[in-house]
């Protein structure tokens, strides 16, 4: 039977870069943390599920005290692009079943059935990229999101009205264009913080922020710790 186990973490503590020998899901029961994998930061909050492939290297910083339920999975259950997020549909129902079986100590058979249900729901979910129409994907791929061009230029690339673009963008991507740009800038800033020794003011300028203060406010709100602390925690 796949292992299911709980981990508890104190606030403001870190797990340095590490990997696991199996694919697994982390269900965030309480609290939250910031995780970096492949140089990309992600905010993992209570109620979300985070998937990892076997041997995928990552590091974590717990922005608050956190309690997590970890479920080992078959490799086929972890496929395609996946970021942490609130599960929906069959995955949500399966997550709830795993948490319920574990917390009530329902017994090995019930927990195993819940894990198999979760694996099946994850394995059958469609790749996220397929939910985005080709015309919108073209705008996402071609527009310089972490740069300075006004957002109306993203709509112009594909020849649609800005209002229609914004509405369809939010419907298919789950973020407004402004929110998507903010995330792109934070990710670009993360890359520069971890891979270069650039001063914070230069990072801010390279990522489209007004100044260092703007970078610090936006970065801290997104990831739970300011850029200088982020660099100390996650730089190798």
Image: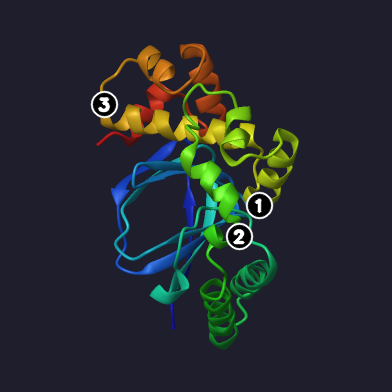
Q: Earlier in the sequence, mark 1 or mark 3?
A: 1
Indicate which label's residue lies in the foreground, 1 or 3: 1
Q: CA distance from mark 2 to mark 3?
A: 35 Å
The residue nearer to you, when weighing 175 against 194, is 175
Residue at 43% x, 78% y: name it.
2
Relative vertical location of residue 11 with respect to residue 93 in this rendering, above or below = above
Residue at 44% x, 67% y: name it.
79
Q: Which residue is mark 2?
A: 131
Q: Position of residue 82 (x, y in %)?
A: 49, 57
Q: What label does residue 196 carry, if any?
A: 3
Q: Earlier in the sequence, mark 2 or mark 1?
A: 2
How crowded is the residue under tag 2: few (<14 C-alpha within 10 Å), some, or many (20+)? Answer: few
Q: Position of residue 85 (x, y in %)?
A: 59, 53
Disc 2 is placed on an element classified as helix
Mark 2 vs 3: CB contact within 8 A: no
Q: Position of residue 67 (x, y in %)?
A: 54, 53
Residue at 43% x, 66% y: name it.
24
Q: Earlier in the sequence, mark 2 or mark 3?
A: 2
Relative vertical location of residue 226 with respect to residue 122 in this rendering, above or below = above
Mark 2 vs 1: CB contact within 8 A: yes
């Amino acid at each position: 039977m796949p292992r299911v186990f709980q981990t508890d973490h104190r606030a403001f503590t870190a797990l340095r870069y590490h990997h696991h020998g199996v694919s697994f899901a982390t269900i965030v029961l309480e609290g939250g943390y910031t995780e970096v994998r492949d140089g990309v930061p992600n905010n993992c909050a209570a109620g979300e599920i985070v998937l990892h492939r076997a041997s995928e290297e990552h590091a974590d910083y717990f922005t608050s005290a956190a309690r997590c339920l970890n479920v080992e999975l078959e490799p086929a259950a972890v496929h395609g692009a996946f970021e942490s997020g609130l599960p929906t549909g069959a995955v949500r129902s399966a997550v709830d079943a795993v948490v319920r079986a574990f917390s009530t100590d329902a017994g090995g058979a019930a927990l195993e059935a819940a894990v198999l249900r979760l694996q099946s729901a994850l394995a059958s979910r469609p790749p996220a990229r397929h939910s985005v129409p080709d015309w919108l994907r073209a705008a996402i791929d071609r527009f310089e999101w972490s740069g300075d061009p006004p957002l109306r230029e993203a709509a112009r690339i594909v020849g649609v009205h800005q209002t229609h673009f914004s509405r369809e963008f939010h419907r298919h991507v789950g973020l407004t264009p402004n929110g998507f740009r903010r995330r792109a800038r934070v990710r670009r800033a993360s890359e520069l913080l971890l891979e270069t020794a650039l001063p914070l003011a230069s990072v801010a300028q390279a990522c489209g922020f007004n100044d260092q203060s703007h970078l610090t406010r936006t970065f801290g709100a997104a990831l739970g710790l300011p850029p200088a602390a982020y660099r100390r925690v996650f730089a190798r």
